[in-house]
Image: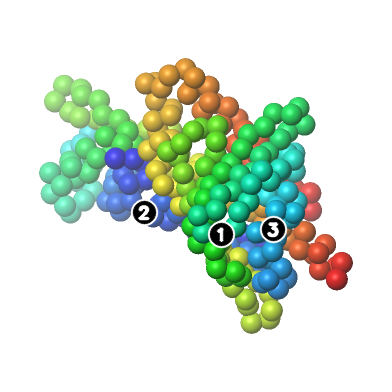
Amino acid sequence: MSKTTFTVNRDERQVMMERVFDAPRELVWKMITDPTYIPRWWGPEKYTTIVDKMDVQVGGSWRFINRDAEGNEFAFNGIYKEVEPPLRLVQTFNFEPIGPGHESTETAVLEETADGRTKMTMTSIAKSVEDFDGLVNSGMESGARETWERLAQLLSQQLTIADRV
Amino acid sequence: MDVFSALADPTRRRIVEILAMSGQLPASDIYKHFESTPPAISQHLKVLRQAEVVKMEKQAQQRLYTVNTAKVEEVEVWARRTVQLWSERFDRLEALLQEEMEEK
């Protein structure tokens, strides 16, 4: 069951999502910055998530790979822009199969609530959605079109919700 | 101009809503919904056309507009996907946090 609240700000090309966790802030920070924990929550259940790189410092890079049961792999990467433990983590985000130029920025902010819980706010900003449009136009070469179709397929697979609760 | 920017303006969003409800409208009918002058609305229609959010067809003397629903959906699709993805992650994070705390 999802207790995530969200707002979409089209003007800012931004989506903001919030969730309160029954855990202290330092522990939540650890879950999002320690490579031993990433594979246990970052990727959807049907994939194995492998941390290829995770250098959590300003300018450091990260790269995670999702692998399905057949061994197909696709990777995500980015650079850390701001690292302020245990409050704030800002990183860029790229989905490798679609190539450069489609980067978004993700900002995680952790706040302690009055009752010792942690509110996490995740803000995702799409740098340029015109690239989405460009990809689906007929002017696209067939190679890029295949990549786009594969992306759409992978994304819809990733986002199939199975409510296991 | 990309879809996001095209829809960032409230007047343009209102134009899209009107067209979504009416199906197809000549420009002259669209102007009637606004206090702004026709040239001002016409400029907004131009932006929406360039971003391919609306389509325009000329029939005799009229310019007929319809919403390009696929395009408008792309904006929503990105937002929805992002929310879904993070909702699921938060669920898993919550379960993981519980496990970690039980171990202590």
Residue at position x 37%, y 38% in the image: A130
> Which residue does the numbered mark 1 point to in the structure image?
A57
Residue A106 in sight here:
no
Residue type at the position of mark 2: Asp
Few, some or many residues within 10 Å of mark 3 (<14, 14–19, 20+): few
Mark 2 and mark 3 residues within 8 Å of each other at the beta carbon:
no
Residue at position x 49%, y 19% in the image: A143
Residue A160 placement (x, y as % from top left): 67, 40
- Depth check, mark 1 against mark 3: the one in front is 1
Is B80 drawn above or below residue A24 in the view shown? above
Residue at position x 33%, y 51% in the image: B8
Same chain assignment for discs 1 and 3? yes
Is A80 drawn above or below residue B27 in the view shown? below
Q: Nearer the viewer, residue B78 or B76?
A: B78
Same chain assignment for discs 2 and 3? yes
Same chain assignment for discs 1 and 2? yes
Q: What is the number of the mark on residue A37?
A: none
Residue at position x 60%, y 30% in the image: A153
Few, some or many residues within 10 Å of mark 2 (<14, 14–19, 20+): few
Is A25 drawn above or below residue B71 in the view shown? below
At numbered mark 3, what does the secondary structure look like: helix, strand or loop?
A: loop
Q: Chain of mark 1?
A: A
> Which residue does the numbered mark 2 point to in the structure image?
A11
Residue with the most extreme bottom position:
A114
Q: Chain of mark 2?
A: A
> Which residue does the numbered mark 3 point to in the structure image?
A34
Q: Earlier in the sequence, mark 1 or mark 2?
A: 2
What is the CA distance from the residue labelled 2 to the residue labelled 3? 34 Å
Q: Chain of mark 3?
A: A
Mark 1 and mark 3 residues within 8 Å of each other at the beta carbon:
no
Residue A102 in sight here:
yes
